[in-house]
Image (tube, helix red, strand yellow):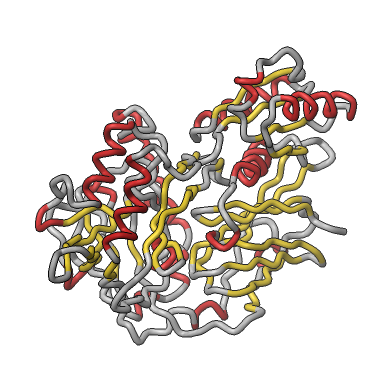
Amino acid sequence: MYALDHAYARALCVRRQLHVHREGLQRPLAHQRLGLDAVRPPQAARNGRGRALGRVPRPEADATAALREHHGGGEPDDPTAHDNHICPVTPTHPGNVAEYVMPCAEILPGGDTQGMSAEYATFGLAPAMRAGGVLANGDYQVHRDFVDFIVNGRPLLFQLADLDAVSPLASDIPPAIFTTHVRRLLLEAEAPLRDGRYVIYGCPECEGLECGAVTAVIDRAGEDGEDYVWRDFAWQTSEHADLERNGYHGIGPFRFRGGEYRAALGRLLNGAEPAAGRRRVLLIGARVALLAKLAAALRMIGIGAEIAADASGVPAEELRTYGAVAFGRAVPERMRDGVRAAFEGAGVEVRYVDGFAPVVPLLVAQIEYALDRSPLAQRRLTRLTVAGGAAVTEVTSSCRVRLTAYRVDRLLRTRVHEVLDEVLAPGEHRVALPGKSQFVVARTPDSVLVSAVSP
């Protein structure tokens, strides 16, 4: 455990697991609404906490067919919220969905397991983000920056089942441990698991194997052992990987040219790690109580936050550590111009956030979006537009999408509607919104988008 104190993280994992259990008793989960049980019955195997490992559908199953139906959501006393519907704008296509559960991250995965097993695959690295946030139920989701594996020009995480996971190459772990992970991938250090298996993706909250991890065997190939091969991908929750029951049978093997593979990972050892972004935000505003709550929420999810009246007198070295600046609605334009001038004088480019409303989860989502520097082609969630009483989202691969609507009533009370929590197929999807919605947050494991509702 690197990002959080170990004891606290394990307690957090148990708390989230109990929350998942309670939610399962109260309402159908997304994978139940998709009818995945009809594809293949649940596995009998259990993880260290006694939770089911999940199920792997047969390759020929059309798991996206159930997306044509939606059971609604929202508050019991809000009839409008129960009239939600999903209308895929672009045609869905039959795909293979593999579902696993990480208790810490409360995952409802359903991804595309169609493999890319060409004789040679390209290998690269790119900065990636696990989006943090304050969820509608009050839970916190930790922000993580990491280096993702780009296989054949596409993030490997997107080619697996929809997982809320990070690679071992996270930016918040000690340098010595980071180096060890890199050397393992280069086969210069011993494999951490039995049978020569290596962790490819793990739990973003605690990184414990008990919560589940995607693992694979890494071998040398070729007459001179020059090439590297990743094979036998599996979901693993203990020292032994059951490939028949929990293997990703449609993924890999991937054979990488040795020169390209070593060059990409070698740059990490030479200190040329892809930039993960500056995870600090400067909060400027007049409502100190609100800013204090916002700063506390940001720190809880792993983002540094400081409160200031302006940026005058702040050393340039400190200004260069910020990735975003958030302005309260009452901050005058003259003060905003002064802050922008201070950052320009320090030679640093930051994103500026104008707070939509005094709602902490909404402001956290805006800041998360501002801190996301990943290329658009490496995001699952690429578009959110809101108009005409509906939200239109676009996703590039099958993934879990959450839509949450916010409004502030005349008594300044915050109203929250969980509009959607589903695994969606690639393409555009139109979702009806509850009446009087003012702001909408769309969330996938790797990105967040925020939009105000147009009249």
Q: Which residue occupies 26% across, 44% down?
A: 181
Residue 189 pos. (x, y %):
16, 45
Q: Where the C terminus falls, by quadrant?
A: bottom right
Indicate whether 379 appears above or below 273.
below
Residue sitting farthest toward the top: 313
Q: Residue furthest bottom?
A: 60
Figure disc tally? 0
User: Residue visible at 67% across and 56% down?
Assistant: 77
Closer to the camera in the image, 53 or 239: 239
Residue toward you, 374 or 382? 374
- Does residue 299 sit above or below 416 in this rendering? above
Residue 11 in percent (x, y) is at 33, 34
Q: Is residue 255 left or right of residue 17?
A: left
In the foreground, 428 or 156 = 156
Q: Is residue 309 visible?
A: yes
Q: Is residue 75 visible?
A: no
Residue in the image at 13% along x and 66% along y: 224
| Up/down of 361 relative to 57, above or below | above
**Left or right relative to 393: residue 247:** left
Q: Point out residue 172 in the picture as x, y percentages from the top left corner.
A: 40, 34
Percent across and percent down for residue 445 are: 49, 54
Q: Is residue 198 left or right of residue 82?
A: left
In the displayed structure, does residue 331 sit left or right of residue 86? right
Residue found 60% across the figure and 59% down from its top: 376
For the N terminus, give its image quadrant.
Answer: top left
